[in-house]
Amino acid sequence: MSKHGLFGIRRWRDDKSGREGLSFWCPGCKSAHSIGLSGPGPNWSFNGDYDKPVLSPSILVSIGGEGTRDPDTGLPYPRETLCHSFVGCNGAQPGQIVYLGDSGAHELRGAHDLEPWPRDYGFGSEGDDQ
């Protein structure tokens, strides 16, 4: 068994800001999503179970909106929701992810099992975590 649980969830700490959090593999986006657990900024709750994680509240991944501007026009980019999900709650069982209808970057909707972190993705692909 991996020290990161069935899904290879990774804990992280940013020493500069003091922020701590975790990252998990999103099967819809085919990339990692990260959330804060403590420190400055928004924080989520985590049940501490790396095999059957429950994260709350929902995880919204978006681009654009406030603070991002088109370099040619200076106008703000509209906010675009890429992925919106719950992990282990609100329709997802612990260890599952449920995608909400406003997820725009992928076709997955409804509840799906979390997937293991791909070994070739980079961050967290240690070979000694068995």
Image (tube, rainbow, N blue to C red):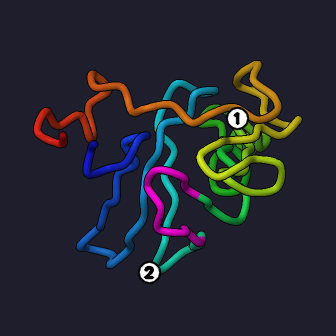
Q: CA distance from mark 1 to mark 2?
A: 25 Å
Above or below, 63 relative to 12: above
How packed mark 1 is, by other alpha carbons closer than 10 Å (few <14, some 14-19, many 20 or more), is: some
* Residue 77 percent across, percent down from the top left: 73, 40
Q: Which residue is mark 1?
A: 82
* Residue that sits furthest to the front in the current view: 1
For the record, the magenta segment spans: 45-53
Q: Residue at x 43, y 55 (%)?
A: 50
Q: Which residue is mark 2?
A: 39
Q: Are marks 1 and 2 in contact (CB under 8 Å)?
A: no
39 lies left or right of 47: left
20 lies left or right of 1: right
Above or below, 80 relative to 93: above
Quadrant for residue 13, please give it: bottom left
* Residue 14 percent across, percent down from the top left: 29, 67
Q: Quadrant of the C terminus?
A: top left
Above or below, 83 relative to 37: above
User: Counting residues from the N terminus, which is met first, the one under dot 1 or under dot 2?
Assistant: 2
Quick one: SS at disc 2? Answer: loop
* Residue 107 percent across, percent down from the top left: 76, 19
Prevalent SS, magenta region:
loop
Quadrant for residue 119, please give it: top left
Which label sits on residue 52?
Answer: none
Q: Nearer the viewer, residue 56 or 66?
A: 56
Q: Quadrant of the N terminus?
A: top left
Magenta stretch encompasses residue 50: yes
Going by the numbered disc 2, the residue's amino acid type is Gly
* Residue 60 percent across, percent down from the top left: 70, 50
Going by the numbered disc 1, the residue's amino acid type is Leu
Q: Nearer the viewer, residue 49 or 87?
A: 49
Q: Residue at x 59, y 69 (%)?
A: 44
Quick one: SS at disc 1? Answer: strand
